[in-house]
Amino acid sequence: MSLAASAQTLSGERPTRVRWRILALLTVLSMLTYLDRLNLSIAGRSIQTEFGFTNDTMGWIFSAFLLGYALFQIPGGWMGDRYGPRGMLTVTILSWSVLTAATALSPKLPLAVWFGVAWSFAVIRFTVGVGEASAMPNANKIVGNWIASARRGIGSSSNLIGIGLGGALTPPLIAWVMQRYGWRSSFYLCGAIGVVFAIAWHLLVTSRPEQHRHVNRAELDLIRSSQSSGKQEAGPGRNRPPWSKMLSSPSVWGLILGYFCQGYPIYFFHTWFFIYLVRVRGFSLTQGGWWDATPYVAIALFAPLGGLFSDLATSKIGKRRGRQMSVWIGMGLSAALMWAGANSPSPYVAVPLLAAGGGLNMFAAASFWATCIDLTENYVASLTALMNTFGNLGGWLSPIVTAYVATRFGWNVALDVTALVTVCSGLLWFLVDASKKLDEGLAAANT
């Protein structure tokens, strides 16, 4: 009997479907995060040409976002666990949207006079990263609150689908706006879209299903039927994550180090891929905008498949092997395709192979996010923030190391390095056991 049928039997009414509307809004939220982080990679060619920045300088500007994003994950996740994710997400959407619009003003800010234009861009992008840092930990907290245990893989993949859709739409949109109105207008547009969505989010979403006026008892029974009975409510003085207990778990170390290695290859697509297409593979600006969307189309296709496969595998062979198998398949195939694409002489063969490699990376990533909920329902945002901190530190290194290796050894070698790091991400999952919940030990530590 399905979960929905069981819930209807218990309550005598058909479950409402508010949880799926919440997941749809999370997908849009994720789309906006990638609109506002990828816009610079598209505008970067024009900015680099206008201000005469070297590849190394652009690498540092690209990475500034990642540094701010990584460093402020844990404070944002902790606040979501303590005060609830809905309010935190409203604040974070507004802050990163305003700061994204401010990127267009970077050359005219006092920072540009005091330290130079490159530093002004880097500082603004750092603050955009700070503003956006709490988005994904709190989005995963929403998934943990709203989605039953048996659907966590597909629930977590809603954020990754948004990455794919946002990434697919961003290159042609930003390229089109740039060609007609200049690169500055693209940042103003991104900021305005974010402000509108923040208002909609605040009006339509609640932190927990019990707080939503359109959720009936049958849907609530369906959501709560397989969740821990000891789940705590957020509130002042509650949910102080005991980091020492978390960091003594081999599963947590496998998860966070594996995500560090996951972040390195995927951020090649977020930063250098457009410039690689135009300058290395010889595409025009317009062609590059369209081809740059292909990894994100692959992500939009492979991320939900990864979530579905992960949920199916856990139902058949258990959470430990099910989540591991999903990661091993995704990362193994991703590494192989990225290596093949890097070394293909034809751009029309190379780009689809690289794009599929990016999509399979996110096939595996769905299990990372679901495992954060599997391990601890009470501290989802905090554990997710810890994992995402490491993932984005890997992402922060990616454009810097890629620029260094590509300049000195060639782009083929730089992409071979990304394939090797991808293999390491999969191997680290030998440490992860998603079936061993941390909540009992964590609850004891807080009493």
Image: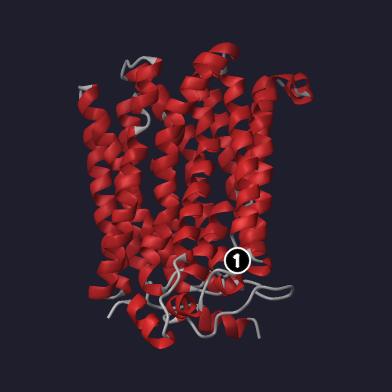
Dot 1 corresponds to which residue? Answer: 207
42 relative to 313, above or below: above
Please tell me which residue lies in front, 435 or 189. Answer: 189
Q: Position of residue 210 (x, y in %)?
A: 58, 75
223 relative position to 326: left or right: right
Q: Where is residue 239 in the image (x, y as percent from the top left)?
A: 65, 74
44 relative position to 316: left or right: right
The number of discs equals 1
Rendered residue at 29%/71% (across/down):
314
Q: Where is residue 288 in the image (x, y as percent from the top left)?
A: 37, 22
Rendered residue at 59%/70% (across/down):
213
Please tell me which residue lies in front, 176 or 430. Answer: 176
Which quarter of the picture shows residue 101?
A: top right
396 relative to 279, above or below: below
> What kind of residue is marked 1?
Ser
Please tell me which residue lies in front, 239 or 181. Answer: 181
387 relative to 230, above or below: above
Rendered residue at 77%/19% (across/down):
113
Rendered residue at 65%/28% (across/down):
103
- SS for dot 1: loop
Please tell me which residue lies in front, 303 or 67. Answer: 303
